[in-house]
Structures are given as C-alpha cells and as structure tokens.
Image (cartoon, coloured by chain):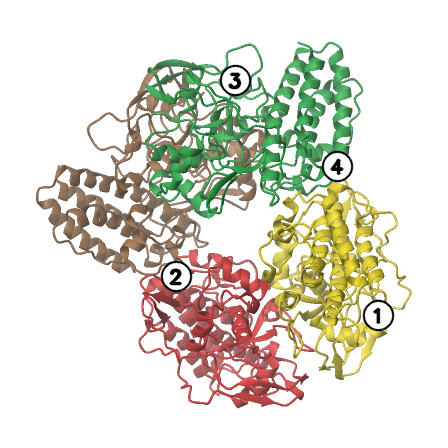
Chain colours: A yellow, B red, C brown, D green
Amino acid sequence: MNLVEDYLKIRKHSEAICEPLQTEDYVVQPIDDVSPPKWHLGHTTWFFETFILKPFAFNYAVFNDQYNYVFNSYYETIGNRVVRTDRGNLSRPSVADVYKYRNYVDEAMVTLLSSEISNEVLELLMLGFNHEQQHQELLLTDIKYILGNNPLFPIYSENHEEVYLKNDLPNEMISIKEGVYEIGYNGTAFCFDNELNRHKVYLSEFAISSALVSNADFLAFMNDGGYQNFNHWHTEGLAWVKTNHINAPMYWYLIDGNWFQYTLNGLVPLKMDDPLTHVSYYEAYAFASWKGLRLPTEFEWEVASNLFKWGERWEWTESAYLPYPGFSKAPGAIGEYNGKFMVNQKVLRGASIATPKNHSRPTYRNFFHPHLRWQFTGIRLAR
Amino acid sequence: MNLVEDYLKIRKHSEAICEPLQTEDYVVQPIDDVSPPKWHLGHTTWFFETFILKPFAFNYAVFNDQYNYVFNSYYETIGNRVVRTDRGNLSRPSVADVYKYRNYVDEAMVTLLSSEISNEVLELLMLGFNHEQQHQELLLTDIKYILGNNPLFPIYSENHEEVYLKNDLPNEMISIKEGVYEIGYNGTAFCFDNELNRHKVYLSEFAISSALVSNADFLAFMNDGGYQNFNHWHTEGLAWVKTNHINAPMYWYLIDGNWFQYTLNGLVPLKMDDPLTHVSYYEAYAFASWKGLRLPTEFEWEVASNLFKWGERWEWTESAYLPYPGFSKAPGAIGEYNGKFMVNQKVLRGASIATPKNHSRPTYRNFFHPHLRWQFTGIRLAR
Amino acid sequence: MNLVEDYLKIRKHSEAICEPLQTEDYVVQPIDDVSPPKWHLGHTTWFFETFILKPFAFNYAVFNDQYNYVFNSYYETIGNRVVRTDRGNLSRPSVADVYKYRNYVDEAMVTLLSSEISNEVLELLMLGFNHEQQHQELLLTDIKYILGNNPLFPIYSENHEEVYLKNDLPNEMISIKEGVYEIGYNGTAFCFDNELNRHKVYLSEFAISSALVSNADFLAFMNDGGYQNFNHWHTEGLAWVKTNHINAPMYWYLIDGNWFQYTLNGLVPLKMDDPLTHVSYYEAYAFASWKGLRLPTEFEWEVASNLFKWGERWEWTESAYLPYPGFSKAPGAIGEYNGKFMVNQKVLRGASIATPKNHSRPTYRNFFHPHLRWQFTGIRLAR
Amino acid sequence: MNLVEDYLKIRKHSEAICEPLQTEDYVVQPIDDVSPPKWHLGHTTWFFETFILKPFAFNYAVFNDQYNYVFNSYYETIGNRVVRTDRGNLSRPSVADVYKYRNYVDEAMVTLLSSEISNEVLELLMLGFNHEQQHQELLLTDIKYILGNNPLFPIYSENHEEVYLKNDLPNEMISIKEGVYEIGYNGTAFCFDNELNRHKVYLSEFAISSALVSNADFLAFMNDGGYQNFNHWHTEGLAWVKTNHINAPMYWYLIDGNWFQYTLNGLVPLKMDDPLTHVSYYEAYAFASWKGLRLPTEFEWEVASNLFKWGERWEWTESAYLPYPGFSKAPGAIGEYNGKFMVNQKVLRGASIATPKNHSRPTYRNFFHPHLRWQFTGIRLAR
C-alpha cells in the first residue's frame, strides 16, 4: 500500500467528478439535502486539515482561519459553522479558491505521508479516505439534482451510465433457512463504527429476490392506482405523498402522454428494463405491499448478499438505523461521525452507481430519512 | 365471562375518569396530540357503533349520521373525518349529547350481547374493549395536559396518586445470559396484532436495572449541564431541545429557586424519590448516555420483565416500532389499527399509572414519536 | 344620563348575546382571530377592573390575581398575558367563574358610579362602554364563526336577522363635487382617538353607489370566472386565493349544485337580494375591478355618508389605516388602544348588524387586515 | 436624443455594476428578496425581447424558448415562470450564456432602433430604459447583500462610496404652510403610471427636517433602549423585532465592544456622521416616535422636496402605497407593472446611492413592505 498514491488517487477522483461542471454548477443548493459541489470539495479537504494536519503535521499553518466556519459540517466539538441551509448562499470562497485550498492541503498531506506515520494517524487517514468517498457519492447525486431540476435539463456527461449490470440473471426468490447468523464486520481492513460489533441474530426462514424492481414493475404499480390506494401506505407516507403531490419517482416526467426520465445523460424516454431508482422508503414499502411482499431487513440482506448481484442501487430495508450490541463511539469529534444520527432513519444496504469502487461491502450500512429519494435508491423484495 | 357486565364495566370506567371534570375541560385541545375528553368519549362509542352495531345488530339505526365525520379518528376505509387538529374547535356535539350517544349505543350493545354472538363479533368486541382501555389511558394523560398547562393549575383529584409502588426493591443490575429467546404473545387471550408472530431473537448478554430512574437522578443530570452537553444527544434531539427551549421534564416548574411538579393533585414540590416521568425518548437517551449506560431494547425488556416490578411508567426502549416476522394486517378497516404507524416511532414497554388494570402484559408494545412526553413515560437503564 | 343604568344596560347586552349558547360554545377558538366568548366576557370585565376599579375605587380587592394574565389582551404596559392563540386552550376559568367575575366587578362599579366621579373616571368609563360595545360586535361574529364552521351547523337563534334594511332605494351613483372637505369627529360626545384631529382633505370629483353589492352581483362575478382572472387581483390577493383555495365568500356552501349560506338562523338557500357579506378586502377590490369601478376612500365615504343608508355591513374602503394629522396617543396603557395598529390594515366604514345601536357614526373608523372576512363586511362601489 | 446611444449606455451600465463580481457572485439568492445578479441581467434583457422585439421587430427569432420561463418575473399575462424563491437554485443559464443573450438582444434592438419607430415602441422603449434602471438599483443592493452576508466579508469595490453629499447644510426644521397643493407628475418626459394623475391634496401646516438622521442619532436611540421600549413600536414592528432578534440596522456588527458596518468597501468602523441606512419602516417609525416627531407623508415630502438635499437614501414615509385619484392600468401585460402591488406597502421618496443618475424625480414613488431594509433606506423626520 502506497499511502501517498492512494491519497492522491482518491483526492483526484473527487475533482474528476466535477470536471464536467461549469463554475455556476458548483455553487447552488436547490434543497437542504443537496450541498453545493464546491462545499463538498472544501469540506473533505477541511476534514484532512482539521483531524490530521492541525494536530499531527509539524508547523502546519492553516490555509484560512475562516474556512473552519464555512466547511465544518456538523461537528459540535469543532465549533460554530454556517447553518446547513445557507451553504448555497455563499458565493465565496470561489471555486478557484477551493481548488487552491485543496492543493495547499494536498501538498501538506503528501509531505506528512512521505515520512513515517503513527497508527493513530493511519486510522484517521483511512477514515478520511472513506469520508471523501462518501462525499464522492453525494457529489454525483447532488450534481444530478442540481442539473435535473433545472428547466433546461443540462446533460452532465454522455459517458456516465446509470446502469452497468445487465439484468441477465433469472428473477427468482432465494430461500434462506432459519437460524442464528453473524452480522457485522469482522475483517481487518477499514470499516465504520456502525458496522460493529459483530454479533449474532436469529433469522426466521425467508426468501429474497435475486433481482431489483424495474421501472416497468413500478409503472404497473402506478397504473394500478398505487399512489392513491391508502391500504399500501404508512400514515406518514400518505401524508408525504399528498403534501408534496408525489405521483411518480423523482426525475420522471410525463410529456405528451409518454414517460421520460432525467439521467446523467439528460432527458431520455423511460427505460423499462432498468432497475428502478429515486424512490423513497415510503414508496418502496407501498410497492412491496402492493406486490403482497415486503422489504428485507438489513440482517436478511447481509446474510443473503453473496447470493445475488448488487451494487447499482442503494436498497431500502425495513430496518431502522440503530446501534449494534456493544456499539461505542470514538472519543472526541470523530465520535460524532455516526452515532448521533441513529434515530428516525432507515438502513439501506448495497451500493449505487455513484459509489466509488471498493468503498462498500456486505456489512456496509447507509442510512437516510424515509422520505428522501435523491440518492440512487432502489427496491429488492422479500417474503 | 359475562360480556354485558364486562362491557358496562369498561364503559363506565371511561366516564369515571371524566367525573371530576367541568364541562369546559371536555372541550379543549391545547396541542395536536391531546384530544378533547368528549372526543375520546365519542370516538370509543363510534368504534362499537361502526364496527359492531352497524354490521351486526339487527335493524340498528345510527344515532346521528354526522357523528361518523366527527368521531372517526384515522380510518381511511370509513371515509372523511374532521382533521385531527380541529377536534378542539368543535363545541358541538355538546358533552350532554356525547353522553346521550354513549347511552344509546350502550343500550344497543347490551341488547346485542344479551343474545348469542358469533366469534367474529366476539373478536371485534375484545378489540373494542382494549381500544376503549387505550383511550382511557389517553383520557387521563390528556386531562393532565389540559389542566397542567392552564395558568390556574387546577387540581384533577386529590385521590389520584401518580405513584403506587414503593421503591423498596434494591436498585441493582440484573444480568441475563446470551442466547435465543422467544418474543411475542403466545397465550389464548386477547393481544394486539403487533405482538404477533411469536418468534425467536438472539440476545447478547446484557444487564438491566431493577428500578426506574428517579426525579433525583434526573435532577443530577440537569445540574451537571446534561441538556447543554451535545455529546449525549442525537442531532435531532438537540435540535428539539433548542427549538423548544427544553430544560426540564414536562410539568417541572422552577419557582423562586425550587423545583415543583404539576401532578393530578395539583402543583407540589418535586418528589425526589418518585420515578421520573414525562420525558421524551431524546431525554431518556441522553440521560442514559450521561450515566455511561443505555436504554434496553424491547426484546431485552420482555425477556427480563418477570425479574423486576413494572407498571407505573411507560418505559422508553431503544427499539424502533417495526413489524415482527410474519406480521400481517387484518383485512378491511380494522387492518388500519396498527400497521400503518410502523415508521419513525419508538417502542415503549410496561404500563403506566394511567393504564387500566389487566390491560397491559409483558408482550404489550406501546409506541410514540421520540419527542413526545405527555404520557407517563419513564426510564429504565441497561448495559 | 344615568351612569349606573347605562353601565348595567351595556353589561347586560353582552350577556344577552351569549344567552343562546351552550357552555361548550363559550370555550373554543377555531382560528386565531376568533376569541372564545367567555374570554370576551372576562376581558371586558378586566378592562373596567384594571383601568377604573384598581386605580380609583376605594379599597378595591382584585377578584383573582391570575385573571390579569388570562384576560389582558395586548397591553404591554399591564404585563405578561396568555398568548392570543392559546385563548382557546384554557378550559378554566369556567364559564360560571367568568359570570361570577362579572357580577363581582359590576357590584364594585355600581358602588363607584353611585357616588360622584371625576372627569378622568368619566372619560375612562366612556372608553369602557365603547370598548365593551366593540367586543359585543366581536362576540357575535366570533359566535357565528364557531357555529358556522361546525359540521353540525347549529342554529344560533331563529330571531336574529342578518338584514333589516329593505333594499328599497334605487341603486344609483351619487355624484360629489370636488373641493376641500372636513374629515374627523368634531362633536362633544365620545369618539375614539383615531377619529381625531378633524382636518381638511381635498377630494376630486367622485360618484358613490347608493346601494351595497348584493349576493346576486357577486355570484355573477364568480360565474364569470372572477376568482381566476388575475387581472382583477392584487398579487397578494391572488396568492391568498390560491393558498387558501378560496372560491366563494365565507359561509357559502355549494350543495348538489345549489348555493347555500350559513346565517345566524342556520344553513339556508342563498338569498340573492341580500347585501353581500363575509368578503375580504382582496375580494372587494377584485369585484370592483371586474365591474370597472373601484372602492371609495374613507374620506369619500365620510363626505357622502349622509346621502345613502348604511349600518348593515362594514364597508371596505381603499384607504389604509393611518393616523390623521396631529394624531396623538394618550399617555400610559390607554395609549396602546389604537395607534400601534396603524400599519398594514385597511379602513372599514359604517357599521354592521353586529354593531350595538348608537355605537357607530359617520366618522367611525374600523380596521382589519385585508384578508380577513369573518366580520359582516360588504362592498359599496365608487367611480 | 439618440436612441441607440441611450439604449447602449443604459445596457452597459448594468454590466458595469457587475464588473467587480466573480462568476459565483452572479448565482446565489441568500434571501427571497435578493435575486441573483445574472437573473437581473437576463430579466432586463427578456423585457426588451418580450415587449419590443417579439411584437415589433421584423422576423425576430427568440434567443432561447425556455428563457421566457426563467426570466419572466411576475407577468401572469406572459405565462408560467420559475417561482421567485427558486431563482438562486438555477445554475444555468450560465453567466456566459446570459451575456450572450444580452448581446443577441442588443444587436436586434440596435437594428430596430436604427430605423424609424412608432410612438408605441418609443413608449415601451422608455419603459424598458426605466425598468432596467430600477434593476440597476436592485443589482447593487442585491450584490451588497450577497457579499455583506458572507462570513468572509468580501469587498465589492474600493471606489464605491455610499455617501457623496457632505452634511454641510444646517439641520433645521423647514416649515410649510397649510393649503392645497398639487401632487403627481405633470411634465412631458417619462414617468411611471403610479405618479399619475396629478391631483390636489390639502396639507395641514407641517415642518420637515433639512437633514437625514445620522448613524450617531440612531446609536443614541439604541443606547437608550429603543429596540426594547414597546411604546415606540407598532405591534407588528415589535413582533418583527422579537422574531428576528433585531437589535441594530442591517450590516451593523458589534465586535469586541465597537460597532462596525459592512459597506461596499468592506467592513469598516461605524461612521457616526454618515446618514443612517438599512433600516425598516418599523425602525424608522419607532425612531421618530422616540424623538417625539414623526415621518412625513409622501405628499409633504413632495411639496417640500425643493427645499432640502436628497438623493442618497430612499426615505421612508408614513404613506401607504395607494393609487392616485384617476389611476388606471395600461391594457395587457404592461398593466401588471405597478397597480397589482398597491396593498400592504409603504411609499419611499427620493433616491439612493444605488439609483442611476436622472432616474428619480420629486414625484417618483418607490415602495417596499415595512419590514424590508436591504435597500439603502433612511429617515427624514417631520412634525
């Protein structure tokens, strides 16, 4: 493992994602959940500066004192910060300044990594790598939102497919026997604190689908009045549908009687065989109910994950995001990473086409509030 | 079992709870969660009328066609209804009319129950009994809210204690071995659909407290800056604290430097040894974190419940309210009873001083959103 | 003038307005603008207690210290008070207690008025009389709202007509010459501070209608798509229409293709020849625009008021509620009576069927925010 | 008059205002009232395209069909448009594309204006000129807001003074006799419809200050507890102060015990002698009350305006924004220009340092809601 090489490779990938953008695309925040791309680029840099360079690099001079206020996301330990909903109101620092900031921090990091580092720094470095990869995922989904909600429907890139697996496997229900299974990470490489501790769970017998739900499947639900049939919805899901006038997945547009979808390649006719994406948990739950099935729990998913293909969609599970037995937070600011979000969220398993290669694994736990759907979310059914 | 006797006993108990009220107390809805007492009295009556008398009683004439609109709570199957937040805007039907409605339905029910009834009716009757008991609990907590948030602090009744168990057991941590346990109801009497199916869970070793957290315990947390220390809080909990200027449990008042609590007996000095009540899940979680402990899961609670005294406080658990394996909803309107609320809520176990005798049991699952605290909620710690 | 007699007559009239109510009707506050009837009864009593008895009655003992908090409306000088939107959340003081309060204060007032009083007390007494009369108007409109927004549509009273003038005058445009006119009160009896000082205004030539707009007139506007035609609306009016789904005056209901209106006598078929009522300023303005006319200013209205019949509807004018030249506030709490509301409101002139006899006069200025319509508002056109 | 020259001069001035900006500064919308600079540049261009080129230029080809949706501000007649609060969510069209759009329209306009034009086009052209000048004012105030609410406090330009008149006149009260005065525009050059018709008003005797209120004056109000003393405030003003935690004019910052102000030159110590700016009408009213004086009406201001210097601050008046006698709207979309805003707003008179030279005049009526203060507003007192 060459740390400098790994570091630079990961850092350059973030910038590559932004390469097709115009300066203006870096700036806006059309909804609270979507951060401006320049904020992602600055925040991931701030992470290395704050948690590695400031405490561990000899004589390191902070690039700009005020950036701590601008680029701190949610670390109460680190002090005040711009409120999340104001990120898109900040025209400065400019995109050029953010890239200068990246270069400045990268140089200092390369210097640091070129000499020997302690285990403590190595652990923080691995966290920084994975943190930046998580933001790479958000970068792409946020960019898609920024472009896909613009009335001009600009194309992100002609070369970016949203589907790369062919649906060539038979769609079948895979049966799993009841019994005690082990859940959680037990390797020696990096994992997040929320994947620990590895522990036993008892699973009743279940079956899980080998394939994801397709656009055609979901269109059948819509055509059968699925959004109107209250029997399939949670009370809160139905309220969400009505309040927000939801009648299709995000990015679906009905134009002159035909369905289109906005993709990273622009607005195209709905691809019926593609795996469905951009649905909320509420929609996933209602769809499963309409099919007479259900969503898998995160434990069922993890146990069965070696038996089906995954990686194009984050898959909603029925599980709430909760700590595993024996979960503990790291001391200090790093302890704010995951634990404080363990309420009112749902677990997603798998990975999406926005996920950097090798970033996810079968024990990886992603989590979002049940109404969110700007990620590349999808549905796998269980029984 | 004498059904007529049981029916009348349960019905009279609802009215007994309201006996100390003045007419005006029956009418108001100071917050969305608190329904006017006369609404509870009407709604429980409507439940018997709608689900038993209308389909099963010979020649039954509905008391008033418009009451379906006024007293339907949330059954989409049954049709339109007054929006929940408007219940306190309705001066009519008057309290006297609601009692007339009760008498009218009671007479018809007694007639029905005096002859032989089918199993289907019997099951609906048991549901109606338990439904009315659930509303008896809400009646008392809603009445407490109505009186306890009035600047005149009226007394509900001198005879209503909020604590009846003496804290005479030693407060110790009870250890439970790891292993596979059975969870869920498996008796032959009534249970709610959310207690089914009985199934196996694997529990890691844990310890659970024999006693509930006391007012003195929580005051120590407050005096140690517990509400300000972000390390102990969920992000959403901290936002709730700040937005609502929370700095003590509900009904605690600091007057000239001394803490008072509003109880059903009026405003009294804080009773230090009493079990804490009227805290949200967020506060329960933060308190547990401050103690270096945690809340039990609902499964841990159920397994250990025969080893400690319970019944005075609804106890927050760390578990999200989710369906058990194999959970299924009843067909028709009755299927709307529980399942559609299984998202974004936390499970509480036990019972409170507002719970009718014999209504709860070790497998009983109550559930509320994490910020709510007008119920008699409390804290039991685990490790 | 017999002050004791006048006092008791005015006080009894407030109670007479409430005579048809059931206890529950006294309690609720379905919208922020509508206060519970028992609050009106208590507040007008508090006014005499606070501004006359406490400072001027020998050895007067306050009825209940806490009532100052409950019944102070908006007098910052007098101290803290229940927030306006919480008035309907207070079940106590009970209706019976409010009547006891009235009797207690009435006795003390009668004692005070039975001996000689100073000019200062006399002025406050006249203000108290007129204040109570203003609340009598609100009492009736608030009661109408409470009953008219109840799904049971209870009848207030069979004896209460909403129209007493016959529309027997020809509907014609009355022309007024241009010139300098005097505006504002110049008699020797009571008037409100906002009617002073009497001053000169220059009016261009104008014409004003002898009759009010009728229900039939407004229905023609509706049938011509008036609510949809943006050309006739203020931007803020149009937003109000869309946000609140307004498509008819308040209390109009379309049932099986026929228009009905809720009146103090209950729900009745729309009376086409009756003067229109319960429209907002926005609707009044749009209607006038649709007719190719406009609303009069308050000065035009005052100058022409002796040439037409008025008194059944409060009539919207185009004038904003602003101080007259030389306007000054009284010192102390009484100075908060009118001046602090002189922004963002529109002036209404005339009187309505809810206005006590002899309470209004040609110089009387009523005022409401432009979106409000629960008063008996109407439209007179000008050119 | 050379129309081509005038046209290009005005158009270039808008671009000159944006010259110091970085691309990112063109994009953001930190509050609803502040539009992104690139939107202003596009909207003023759209105005010429829509109202002159499309109907009058031979064979004119629209630059981009979708720009009508993006750059229509509020003309219902012209069709759907992006909601105002979403302007800052649109990264496209890019700044470069907006400049291309300007050039494209400018070329077509120059061609059109190089041949003879009708009176109808001439009138629309004059409206277009004045419309663009109004947006030049907004451009500068919006830019100030964008930069002045950024935590980095970037400097707009070192060369842009916010004060150019020296306060060398004695500050005295100028007395005006009572009588009939003529109000409104009566020249032959351009004026807005809201300045018509010229008509007579009767003014009581009054006095008006020759100088504007200074920063030092307002600081004295603050130091005397002016923001806390409810006696000086409208009820709605006080609610605005409390809800928004207002304790100083906009752009004032208290740093280590000293007051600073953000200006177009960056953050500088408060200049005591400069005319106060960035206060709301509510603050202006409260300040005048504290001084024992009042704000002038717009009529008083207009009558006295030749007796004092004005032009650096928009001056709040006590007058509501209402139509003059005989006011009429133009037919079609242009009729939406002014009339539909004549409710709930206050009139400002004068001009500010952001106003283009020769744009304002003594009869000019600007108008804003009473809580707004991001314009260069100021205070002149009257008695």
- Please tell me which residue is depicted at 64% across the width and 53% down the height of the picture: A68
Q: Position of residue C374 (x, y in %)?
A: 41, 42
- Please tell me which residue is depicted at 24% across the width and 58% down the height of the picture: C65
Point out which mark residue A291 bears: none
Viewer-side label of 3, 2: 3
In this view, the residue farthest toward the right is A168
Q: Which residue is mark 4?
A: D93
- Rounded to the nearest angstrom, the CA distance separating label 2 from label 1 is 55 Å
- Rounded to the nearest angstrom, the CA distance separating label 1 from label 3 is 75 Å
Asked if labels 4 and 2 share a chain, the reply is no
Q: In the image, what residue type sits under mark 3?
A: Arg
Number of numbered callouts drawn: 4
- Rounded to the nearest angstrom, the CA distance separating label 3 from label 2 is 61 Å
Q: Which residue is mark 3?
A: D361
Q: Position of residue A13 (x, y in %)?
A: 82, 55
Q: In the image, what residue type sits under mark 2?
A: Val
Q: In the image, what residue type sits under mark 1?
A: Ser
User: Circle 1: is it few (<14), some (14-19), or many (20+) Cα within 10 Å?
Assistant: many
SS of the residue under disc 2: loop
* Res C75 visible: no
- Rounded to the nearest angstrom, the CA distance separating label 3 from label 4 is 36 Å
Which quarter shows the C terminus of chain C? Answer: top left
Which quarter shows the N terminus of chain C? Answer: top left
Write down the chain letter for disc 2. Answer: B
Q: Position of residue D149 (x, y in %)?
A: 58, 42
Compared across the picture, whether C310 is left or right of C191 comes to right
Q: Which residue is mark 1?
A: A210
Q: In the image, what residue type sits under mark 4?
A: Pro
- Rounded to the nearest angstrom, the CA distance separating label 4 from label 1 is 43 Å
SS of the residue under disc 1: loop
Q: Which residue is mark 2?
A: B27
Write down the chain letter for disc 4. Answer: D
